[in-house]
Amino acid sequence: MTQGDRSGLILACCGSAAAAAAVTALLVSRSRNSRSLFERELERVRRECRHLREANERLQKTLPERNGSFDETSKSTLTIAEIETLKAVFDCFDATGSGALTIQDISLVHSKLGEPLTDEEAAQAMAILDPARTGMVTFRQFREWWENKHKDFDNADNYRQRFKLLRAKLEDSSGFDITKIQTQQVGQPGSRRFRVKFYYKQKNNVLKQISPWHDIPLFNLGTGQHAKIFNFICEIPKWTRAKYEIATGELFNPIKQDVKNGQLRFYKWGDMMFNYGAFPQTWEDPKLVHPDTQKSGDNDPIDVIEIGTKQMQTGEVAPVKVLGILALIDDNETDWKVLAIQINDPLAGELNDIDDVQQKVPGAVHAIREYLRVYKTLEGKPENSFALDEEFMPKDYAVSIIEETHNSWLALRSGNKDTV
């Protein structure tokens, strides 16, 4: 209703033009006062918002990092995979798990790698990484240094070169480069003759046939309980159902489609919702009863479920980080299922342990467990069961199980066995 409408209504009700004029003047005055009050209130809100924005900007500059993450405005020249690799290197340096490096951490890691630093060298490293002399180096500082923020310092160049050598030592000591792996398909897909064979391009550019199980290193960065990145071999791409697996009973262990009762096997429950495969240089020993499952191993490399967003290919090898593990009991055998994600996946920076998966990808853990429980029922088999209260165990526990299966593989290889 306009001001004129209000005046007309008042005139009709009061029956007096003078009274209507007086009331109209009063409303106009109140309207002006209300508008003035509104404008003053709006200006006050604007001031409050400006103060809040300025306070937030000051807070962002002083907030400590959480889990090595960066605010959204942080710019980087690194790829997701490079950031994840750098974070893994940082974690290797962070021997105490404090989330920051001290001069003792740097000295300790150098000593472990066979290149002990003198006190002077350690002090120089800290001076480069910690110019404010706080005594601690966060991942943000570590990353900024790595991105050449201190490239104008002479000592930085020397230390950067040494760091490259140390990073190489943190990787597989054999110098194996997974980017030099090539695969060759032999036979017709969908036939019993079909195989995916693996080759490695040597320095002389000659291809050498290798076993994906025995020759591809398990560890990509770090080793044993301190491993941060692992090499994953994809057997079954997500959104497919042909049951491919590493042929542990054949020479050079190519990937083949499993056969049962003379028939090629497919997952009858439906397509895989994840990339499925195995870690090389692992073996679940059928003679070893695990105390947490009270069941022996299933005589295969340890299985891995890669939950990234990209569909991989059969025979593809990729660096992943471990998130957790599930103790599946299949045919009365322990059949561990490691949960992992490629380090170049868009979600890699968000997922570091099993709790992150449950929070960032709600429903995924439950769906995977239920799929593994029932997928064999269409073959007339009973549902699978699980140990450890059916829980996905955290990353540290998973790494310990992987290390156990790696030791079992080492024992197998000590007897010069290539097949099982």
Image: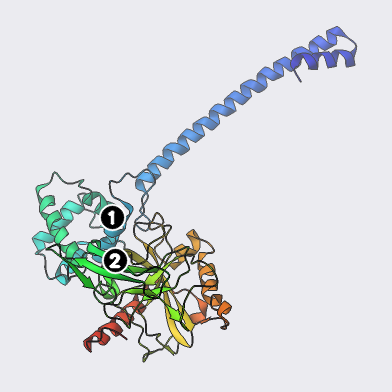
Between 90 and 189, the one nearer to me in the picture: 189
Where is residue 305 drawn, in percent x and y? 42, 69
Where is residue 271 drawn, in percent x and y? 51, 66
Vertically, is 28 above or below 405? above
Cα gap from disc 1 to disc 2, whole angstroms: 29 Å
Between 187 and 344, the one nearer to me in the picture: 187
Q: Secondary structure at mark 2?
A: strand
Image marks 1 and 2: residues in contact by CB distance under 8 Å: no
Q: Which residue is mark 1?
A: 82
Q: Quadrant for the N terminus, please.
A: top right
Indicate the quadrant where residue 119 lies.
bottom left
Q: Which residue is mark 2?
A: 184
**Which residue is at 31% across, 56% downward?**
81
Q: What residue occupies the far bottom of the structure in this picture?
A: 287
Vertically, is 65 above or below 404? above
Vertically, is 381 above or below 348? below
